[in-house]
Image (cartoon, rainbow, N blue to C red):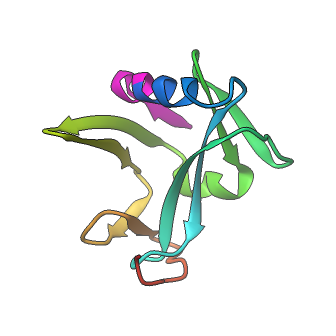
Amino acid sequence: MIQVSEAASEKIVEILSSANARSFLRVGVEEGGCSGLSYTLIVDEKKTEGDILLNKGEFSILVHTNSIKYIEGLQIDYEESGMLGGFTLDNPNVRASCGCGASFRMANYRGEVKKCD
């Protein structure tokens, strides 16, 4: 369902180790952004009804069932460039994205377009 590169795994473990010992990486999709859908990557401590737990060895990912149709096949990587670094998300379901890459739309669903902050 979700593939995580070695570089991203290392960064996720680093982030989660500075949080509560029972923390997860929550990956999801919400309405918004200039293309209609935006990713969410947050540290979360609570598994809720409707969540799927994906064990990735040293850490676990939570995905709510509502987001699965948008992120099936998602590949998460982490890249450093000079003094900056960040996660990159490669989603085979995306048909168009905004210029900054923060939001996307799918072939069969555009989401609710909202101005980016």
Q: Does the magenta stretch include residue 8?
A: yes
Above or below, 41 relative to 75: below
Name the spot of residue 44 as percent of width and height, x first.
Answer: 67, 42
On the rendered image, what quadrant is the N terminus found in? top right
Name the spot of residue 62 as percent of width and height, x first.
Answer: 67, 39
Q: Specify the segment rendered in magenta.
A: 1-10
In this image, 97 relative to 14: left or right?
A: left
Q: As drawn, which residue projects farthest toward the top? A: 57
Q: As drawn, which residue projects farthest toward the right? A: 49
* Along the viewing direction, whichever of 18 and 33 lies nearer the viewer: 18
Q: Which residue is drawn at 48% across and 83% down?
A: 113
Q: Which residue is drawn at 74% across and 39% down?
A: 52
Name the spot of residue 112 as percent of width and height, x first.
Answer: 54, 82
* Along the viewing direction, whichever of 61 and 17 lies nearer the viewer: 17
Name the spot of residue 95 as percent of width and height, x first.
Answer: 37, 66
On the rendered image, what quadrant is the C terminus found in? bottom left
Q: Quadrant of residue 51?
A: top right
Q: Which residue is drawn at 27% across and 67% down?
A: 100
